Image (cartoon, grey):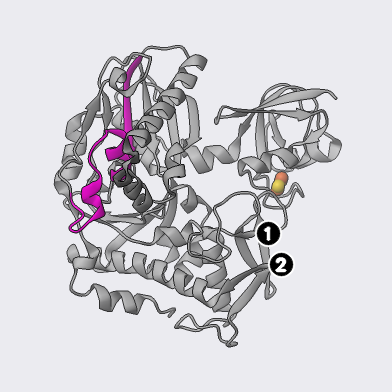
Amino acid sequence: MIKHSIRLHPLGKELMVNDQTPLIDVLHEFGIEFPCGGKGTCGKCKVRLLEGEIKTTEDHQQKIEKLGLSDDWRLACFSKCTTDITLEIDQFNHLILADESEFDFCPQEGFGVAVDLGTTTVVAQLIDLSSAKVLAVETMLNPQVRFGADLISRIQSCIDGNQTEMTRIIRAVIGKMIDLMMKKHPVELQKVVLVGNSVMQLIFSNGNVSPLSMYPFKTDNLGLKTLIPEELGWNFQVKEKVKFYPSIGSFVGSDILAGILATGLHQKEKFTALIDLGTNGEIVIGNKNQIVCASTAAGPAFEGANISMGMRAVTGAISSLNLVEDKIEAIVIGNTAPKGICGSALIDAIAILRKLDLIGMFGEINSGETAIQITGKVSLSQKDINEFQLAKAAIATGLSILARKLSIELDEIETIYIAGGFGSYINIENLAATGMIELPQEKIHKIGNTALIGAKMFLFSDTEMYEEILTKTRHINLEGDPNFQNIYVDKMLFL
Ligand code: FES
């Protein structure tokens, strides 16, 4: 059997397939979506052919032209692999790299690496500092996931004696990612900067995480960390010291500091908010004079935890739901039978069930049954709905308390940005309908991976830049607010 290689940019992944393999059969394993189910109408599965050949049929050619795409684009859902090919995946550009946002920078000499060290995923970019152009990208799963999926279990695992190993493996993986990028582009590195939540920062720099496991959850060890490649076990040179940027508070890390920089909210006259619906659910509101931020316990529900049929955004997960003539239609990642529901579709489900009056204002299932079927074998139980209420109340309460700390009304916020890979999938109309963000949907915008954009901006900025943001920023303990309980109970309702 003849085999061909498919290389996927900008992830740098490579796979071998049999001759004549339809791309739709293999690309969904990489999380690529086929929203119109391969009808060739949405154009969302478009790939740019960088090397090799994909012959087009007349039908395929017409679809490409109708979508206004140039010659080098193909629709993956209409393509078969008949030679070795290299593809640029358009969805990766939007969802993972969020690289289209331009920013002002002062050109510098040399090359740098920006790393977003997430609890689940690590993304690194090699940047030409003279043009801010991204030369290479690597993404990998954080190998610490075998020590626990969330931050609390990672902290516990450190306390149980695994920290040395967790530090070693994350340093090794990031070193390997940089190595891979430099193999493609042999350059001398001027600088490497990292951002991540406070637990990731402490583990990477081999700091003591145990203060974050008990009241008052505070440590004064969250400042800028500088390290040299040798102590990280890296076998390449970096001219300047490797920098892991400082956290803002115990559970608000430098990924959020980078997010503030990326949105530019610290320089704006009007108030802007940033919400990262990742594992932790961090919220920031501020302007050029003052900034407040907090972390909430909202994340796990959106990552599938505590939801009976919840799952991450991988093949088989329902990624979105639409109401078409009073019938619920599901879009499933990989275009397969649905196995479960991911965070973005959970928001859709709640908004649709409310619209159909199948759940009431207290979250109760109106029929009195214990679950509601969504599609196929996937259903939402009463407990799932209550879990969602807890998560949405956590965000709504966070926004409300932070606005009070600034002595402003919520509607004085001009723009709310939703960050993170998960944020990119969210249907804003449905999000607003659930009451999680009590502002008109026109004010809510998706912004992509602000941690990575900000990390890249740190490559061009001096220390004064982050010090200015830190000086303006107050970390708020939401639970410590005397009104927390009352507001939280209030925000559980669907109004
Ligand atoms: S054009 Fe919609 S999935 Fe290919």
- Residue lying farthest to the front in this orientation: 161
Where is the C terminus found, in terms of image quarters?
Answer: bottom left
Say whether residue 484 is left or right of residue 434: left
Where is the N terminus found, in terms of image quarters?
Answer: top right
Q: Which residue is mark 2?
A: 376
Which residue is rendered at x = 25% and y = 25% of the image? 227
Say whether residue 187 is left or right of residue 332: left
Which range of residues does the magenta coloring cover? 189-218
Numbered mark located on residue 407 in the image: none
- In the rendered image, the vertical position of residue 367 relative to residue 258, given as above or below: below
Identified by mark 2, the residue type is Gly
User: At which x and y percent is residue 307?
Assistant: 52, 65
User: At which x and y percent is residue 4?
Assistant: 75, 24
User: At which x and y percent is residue 55?
Assistant: 81, 28
Query: Is residue 203 within the magenta segment?
Result: yes
Disc 1 crowd, CA 10 A, few/some/many (<14, 14-19, 20+): many
Say whether residue 474 is left or right of residue 103: left
Query: What SS does tag 2 mark?
Result: loop
User: At which x and y percent is residue 353?
Assistant: 57, 76
